[in-house]
């Protein structure tokens, strides 16, 4: 497995923010596995399972979800329904080669393909996003934005 690139020092890295695109969320009733576009990722009871506009799904740990997403009325916080990501910038690098990236508490590997985007979140964790989905849901931010 190749080493994950240092996005903070890579000259090709972009600072981006997720657009406030609504996603559907269901909170897991039991531990399980989510088949993402980039590979299988385990989740725990209470974690959020998000479904995007193209039907793609991915899990987000309950604490990270609570800190990063807000409910869209009439959905009440903590209930299944519609949510959107709170504004926060992340680092993004378009992959020039395939790369396996460890994610989450379990260290499962996302399989990034050439052309996908590697993201590094503020907490130091990583994600991989398909190029088409990245272009629909992320936008560049000014360098001085948090």
Image (tube, rainbow, N blue to C red):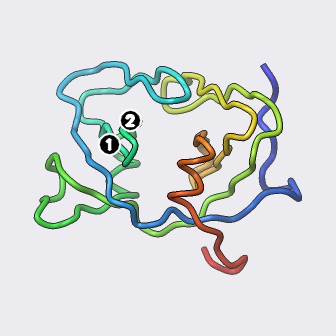
Query: Between residues 72 and 9, which one lies in front from this camera angle?
Result: 72
Q: Secondary structure at mark 1?
A: helix
Q: Quadrant of the C terminus?
A: bottom right
- The residue that appears at 67% across and 31% down in the rendered structure is 112
Counting other residues with Cα less than 10 Å from the Cα at mark 2, is it few (<14), some (14-19), or many (20 or more)? some
- 31 sits left or right of 15 in the view: left
Which residue lies at the image location 68% right of the left edge and 57% below the top edge?
91
Q: Measured along the vertical axis of the image, is residue 117 above or below residue 46?
A: below
Q: Position of residue 142 (x, y in %)?
A: 68, 79
The spot of residue 102 in percent (x, y) is 62, 28
> Among all residues in the image, which is located at the extreme right?
11
The residue at which mark 2 appears reads as 57
Element assignment for label 2: strand
Whether residue 15 sits left or right of residue 22 in the image: it is: right
Q: Position of residue 122 (x, y in %)?
A: 59, 57
Pointer 1: what residue? 62
Is residue 65 found left or right of 128 in the rendered image?
A: left
Q: How far is mark 1 from mark 2, CA to CA?
A: 15 Å
């Amino acid at each position: 497995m190749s080493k994950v690139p240092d996005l903070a020092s890579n000259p090709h890295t972009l600072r981006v923010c997720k657009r406030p695109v609504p996603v559907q969320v269901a909170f897991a009733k039991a531990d399980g596995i989510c088949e993402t576009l980039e590979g299988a990722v385990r989740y725990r009871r209470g974690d959020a399972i998000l479904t995007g506009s193209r039907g793609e799904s991915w899990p987000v740990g309950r604490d990270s979800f609570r800190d990063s997403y807000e409910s869209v009325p009439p959905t009440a916080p903590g209930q299944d329904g519609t949510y959107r990501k709170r504004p926060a910038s992340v680092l993004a690098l378009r992959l020039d080669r395939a790369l396996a990236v460890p994610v989450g508490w379990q260290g499962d590997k996302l399989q990034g393909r050439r052309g996908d985007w590697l993201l590094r979140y503020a907490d130091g964790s990583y994600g991989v996003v398909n190029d088409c989905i990245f272009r629909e849901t992320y936008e560049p931010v000014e360098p001085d934005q948090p």
